[in-house]
Amino acid sequence: MPAESLVQRDAKVIWHPDTQMLSEPAPIPIVKGEGALLIDEQGQAYIDADASWWVNIIGHGHPLVAEKIAEQARRLEHCIFACLTHEPAVQLAEQLLELLPGSCTRIFYSDDGSTSVEVALKMAIQYWHNQGMPRLKILALEGGYHGDTFGAMSVGAKSVFTAPFEPYLFEVTYLPLPKPGMPFPLAEESLQEYAAFIFEPLIQGAGGMRIYDAGALDDWLSICRQHHVLLIADEVMTGFYRTGKMFACEYLHQKPDIICLSKALTGGTLPLGVTACTEKIFKAFLSQDKRKAFLHGHSYTANPLACSAALASLDILRTEAYQQRIVQIIHHHQLFLERLREYPCFQHPRQIGTIAAFEVLDEASYTSPLRDELYLFYLRHGVLMRPLGNTIYLMPPYCITDAQLAQIYEATYALGEWLLQRT
């Protein structure tokens, strides 16, 4: 009897994320990553057009990152972080605080983007509680996505992601995406009740790659700040040059009190979350009363391997070669989107930094039946593209070559011709 394939073995034991296991296409058995490519067990290479869920900015299999992880593993693979510390965690915190916009002075480590948001929300709520001035409400933007844990779901849009759990989510006040000249939609005196305002700066990712105006957001943040509402920037997706700057909040005059990071933080190698905050917030937890401590932690908080990977990724990201490549990707995307306008089946072409997006045929919908067709079409052209329903987006690793970008673009033009023939 022949040995079972990896896909057959997978089908017996694995439950994949964000996947309807009854009907969606079988997973591709990947055995190797190389630069912007993922390679399956048959040797077929696929361009990783979405950087493996937006995490892999420096490319797969980078030798420097592998070397740093291996070196750290031989020295110290992990230790409890509640009562111990280690060099990679301290060094990474030092570097991040130098790079982050605003006046953050403290780094709290967690496991991923969703947990970094949970930490931020708990920090903001307890900040007010510790001062005997509880503020019990949270502001968020309509259409946002902040993760799949319960606090993160609560502040995200009510959607297919959250529908079964809505009775368990806490109440949030949602504001529309700000537009130039749009007045602040709440009575300003009501802001005294709000602990924090959480937002994805300039672009909402899983909500459909919706880009919005920095100046309009700034105006609303200024109003919130006047009433001491803490500002939480969810930069889990937007951080590390995705919007053209190191962090999207660099486009804003009003800097956040709390910043959430993950995804590209380690270059796409190991899970790690960061919640950065100002000294004002940190000091609200200092007390002889231990109940005022921030009683939150994760078993793998500040894992040395993950911190070492993040340090290596930051070194690579700041090299002249990668900085130049980011500029080139932005330029190539601009030309690509201009040509897309020739195809009536592609709607709302848009770009911010290295992110390009558009809709296929109709309004954006995460559950669009087109999604599987689009996914398989790109796959046949050697491109791994996981659309958000009928929203297609390009967010490649920065090491992607001009030829590989051209292959993605040509696949998209071919998609346009195919759709025009169908209609």
Image: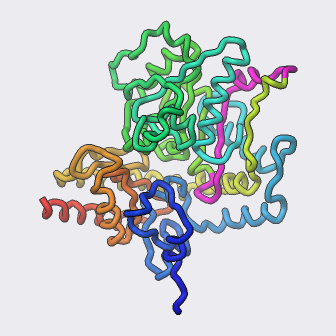
Residue 335 position within the rendered picture, expressed as x and y whole percent measured from the top left? 30, 53
Q: How many marks?
A: 0
The image quarter containing residue 280 is top right
Residue 3 position within the rendered picture, expressed as x and y whole percent measured from the top left? 54, 87
Placement of 390 over or under 385, stated as above or below: above
Placement of 161 over or under 199, stated as above or below: below
Placement of 403 over or under 146, stated as above or below: below
Q: Is residue 157 magenta?
A: no
User: Which residues are drawn in magenta?
Assistant: 266-289
For this view, does 84 lie left or right of residue 229?
A: right
Report the residue at 55% width, 17% height from top: 194
Indicate the quadrant containing the C terminus: top left, top right, bottom left or bottom right: bottom left
> Quick check: can you spot residue 416?
yes
Report the residue at 65% width, 54% height from top: 315
Residue 139 position within the rendered picture, expressed as x and y whole percent measured from the top left? 50, 23
> Quick check: can you spot residue 398?
no
> What is the image's colouring?
rainbow
Q: Residue furthest top?
A: 189
Residue 190 position within the rendered picture, expressed as x and y whole percent measured from the top left? 49, 10
The image quarter containing residue 214 is top left
Q: Is residue 276 magenta?
A: yes
Front residue of this view, candidates 49 and 138: 138
Report the residue at 65% width, 49% height from top: 272
The image quarter containing residue 385 is bottom left
Report the residue at 49% width, 65% height from top: 36
